[in-house]
Amino acid sequence: MNDVEYPPGKQPGREQRLSVQLDTLYRVSEVLNHSLDLNSILKQVLEVLHLRANMSHGMAALLDPASGELLLSAVHAPGASLPPTISYREGEGLTGRILKSGEPLVASRLADEPQFLDRLGLYNTTLPFIGVPIFAGNDSPVGVLAAQPPAEGRAMLEERVQLMEMIANLMGNSVRLAWDVEHERQTLTNERDSLRRAIKAEHGFDNVVGSSSSMRRVFEQVRQVAKWDTTVLIRGQSGTGKELIASAIHYNSPRANAAFVKLNCAALPDNLLESELFGHEKGAFTGATHQHKGRFEQADGGTLFLDEIGEISPTFQAKLLRVLQEGELQRVGGTKTLTVDVRIIAATNRDLEAEVASGDFREDLYYRLNVMPIQVPPLSDRIEDLPALARFLVGKLARRQGRELEINDNAVRLLMQHHWPGNVRELENCLERAAIMSADGAIDQEVIRLTGVVSMESRAPLPMSTSVDLDNPELDERDRVMAALEQAGWVQAKAARLLGMTPRQVAYRIQTLDIPVRRI
C-alpha cells in the first residue's frame, strides 16, 4: 500500500473522496475480521487510516475495567513505538474529554487546544486533530480513536469525522467480541485450574490412608519416585489401591498438569489392546471408520497407567517392549513412526518372577517395568489401619450421598475381625451397603452384620463334599468358588466348568480371594 498524497490545490473531488472512504472501510473490515488480537488489529487499523485515508499520527486507547482509566493500546507515526504505560483519566486531556462526553472532538489546529497534553510527543501541532469515542454495545465509551488529517476546510473535516465514527463502530464490535472471548477463555482457565486442584486433592497423598509401618514405607517410596520420570511397577493383591497409588504418583509429579491415562490390560484381547494402546488408521480393519489415537498418544507428555500388566500375552509383550525401549510406535494399519514422551506406571497382582521363570512373561519386559517396584500390602497385613480407613470411606460416602453418616466403634471392631480377602475395595463395598441399609445414617454392628461381614472366628468353613447350590444368591464370591472347588475335588478345570468360567479366571479368583489351595 502507498500513502495517499494530495498536492496543494489538487484536493480530490467528492466522488474520489467517497471512493477513498469506501476503500478505507473495506480495508479496516478486512483487518478486524482477521484476528482477535486487539493490540495487533488496532495498530493495523491505524496503518490503514494513514496509508489509505491520509490520516496520520493515529492513536487508539481502550478502557481498563479495573481502574476505569484509558490505557494506550496502539500508535502509528513515523518512528513511533508504543510507550510502556500511558493512561488517561476521564476528563483528562483531549482523550479523557472524549471518553467523558462520548462525543467526537474536532480541532482545526491542535496547538490552539488548551487541554492538549502532548504525552505521546508524536503529534504535529500545526495540523487538525480528530478524536471519536469507541462504543461496544453500551451507552458508555470503551475507548477512543484519534488521528490527524491534513490541513483542510471545515467541510472536509466533517467528512473525516464521519469516516472515523464508522471505523470506531466497526472497532467497537471487534473489541466487544475480543473481550467476550477473553472472558470465556479466562473462565475456562479458572475452571480448568479449579478442576486440576480438585483432582490433585482427590488423588493426593491425603486419600491414601494408613499409618502402619508397611504403608509408611509405601508413602516414602511414592514421595521419592514422584519427583522423577522413573518407570514404576506397583504390586499387590486386587483391591489394595494400586490405582490410587498410581494417581498419587502422577498428581504429585512434574507431569501433574498433563494427561493421566489409564488402561486395564486384562479387559481386552490382543487385537483390541493393540488398537487401544497404539491407535489405528482409518480402514485398518473392519469397523475402523476413522483414525483413532491410542492411549500412548493421548498420554504424550503425561503418564500412562497400565493396570493388570501381567495379563497380556507373550505376543503383545514383544510389541509393548519396543515402545517402552524406543519411545516410538506405529498405529495399526499405519506406516508413520510416532514419537511419544510418556511415563509408564504399571500394576499387577501376579507373581511376575514365577512367570518369567516359566516363560509366560518376557524377562526383558520384566526388567524394563520393574525399575522402581512398590509393594502395596493387603488389608489383612495392616489391619491397624482399618479404623482410619473405615471412617475415611464413610466420610467419602457421606459426601456422595449428600447426608451425614457415622460409624460407631462396635462396628469398627467387627470389621477388624474380618479377613478382607477383597482388601480395601471389599471394605468400601461393604460400607456402601451398610450406608444404604442405614436409614438414620448411623452404621452400627447390626448394620455391618446385615452386609454379610462376620468375624473370622465365627465363619464356618464349607464342609467337604457338600453339594451346594452355586446359584444361591446368599453365597458371596469366595464361598461360591470354594464350593465349586469342593464339588470338583479341587480340580480347577472342573470347577471352572461348574462356574461357567475359564480355568484362568478360577486361578485368578483363588489368588485374589485368598483361597487356600488343597492338594487332592
Image (cartoon, rainbow, N blue to C red):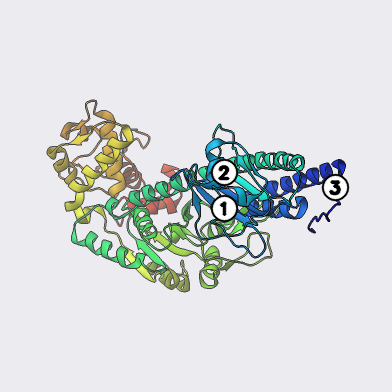
The amino acid sitting under disc 2 is Gly
Residue ID for mark 1 = 73
Callout 1: SS: strand
Callout 3: SS: loop
Q: Most extreme residue toward the front, as rendered?
A: 112
Callout 2: SS: strand
Residue 510 vs residue 275, the one in the foreground:
275
Disc 2 vs disc 3: Cβ atoms closer than 8 Å?
no
Residue 429 vs residue 489, the one in the foreground:
429
Decide if residue 152 is on the left or right side of residue 118.
right
Residue drawn at point x = 61 percent, y = 59 percent: 122
Residue 300 vs residue 432, the one in the foreground:
300
Residue ID for mark 3 = 12
The amino acid sitting under disc 1 is Ser
Residue drawn at point x = 22 percent, y = 30 percent: 441
Disc 2 vs disc 1: Cβ atoms closer than 8 Å?
yes
Which image quarter is the C terminus in?
bottom left
How many angstroms separate mark 2 from mark 3 (CA)? 31 Å
On screen, residue 392 above or below 229? above
- Indicate the position of residue 94 as horizontal and vertical percent values: 56, 46
- Point out which mark residue 190 bears: none
Residue ID for mark 2 = 143
